[in-house]
Amino acid sequence: MLEIRKADISDSDWILNLTHKAFSVYQKALNSSSTFISPALLETLDDVRNDIIKNNVYVAYLDNHPVGSIRFKTLSNQLAYIYRFGVDPELNNNGVGSELINKVIDECAINGYKAIALHTNSKYYKLAKYYYGREFYVHSTDFSKGYIRALFVKDLNGGNIDLSPAFSL
């Protein structure tokens, strides 16, 4: 049975390990000529602990085993930002990621955010297709990290939203 809950400090070690494992797959999907190294692969245990304390971190347990995590933070009173979203690569395509992202979408809608943003590699077709399926759209792309990075946005409660806080992330 799948359980989604807010992370606590005792989850830090496995969240760090899972993040490194999931983002190693992401790193391999980047253009091989890119010198960019995902910051998720450089993350430390203190970084994870700080996110748990300061931001919103959810964890997924499948039959009492940790299998995924997702983080989001407030960029403005209207805009939330998803980052470090990962599922154990050995368990992809079993609904864990969808349940995690649904939890964040529901949480953000309840708390009055008008939109959620995230960045991902625009050439990672599997992820782009996944986010389109969750009704995110590509707002813009840039090459600031050495690869074509897309800013995906999901409208929640309508209205014009200032997305500029997400541009520098």
Image (spheres, helix red, strand yellow):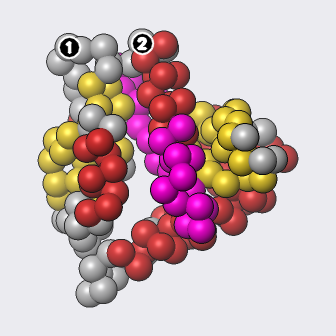
Q: How many marks?
A: 2
Tell me the kind of residue under disc 2. Answer: Gly
**Residue 137 place in picture, x, y as percent:** 20, 40
Tell me the kind of residue under disc 1. Answer: Gly
In the rendered structure, find residue 159 and report the number of the disc placed on it.
1
> In the picture, residue 1 is in which quadrant?
top right
Q: Residue at x 36, y 75 (%)?
A: 29
> In the picture, residue 155 is in which quadrant?
top left
The answer to if 4 sits in the magenta stretch is no
Q: Residue at x 27, y 35 (%)?
A: 135
Judged left or right of residue 107, residue 143 is left
> Which of these two is toward me, 51 or 89?
89
In the rendered structure, find residue 112 and report the number of the disc placed on it.
2
First-in-chain label (2 vs 1):
2
**Residue 109 place in picture, x, y as percent:** 43, 17
Judged left or right of residue 154, residue 99 is right
Residue 92 visible in rendering: yes
**Residue 52 place in picture, x, y as percent:** 68, 40
Dot 2: few (<14), some (14–19), or many (≥20) neighbours within 10 Å?
Answer: few
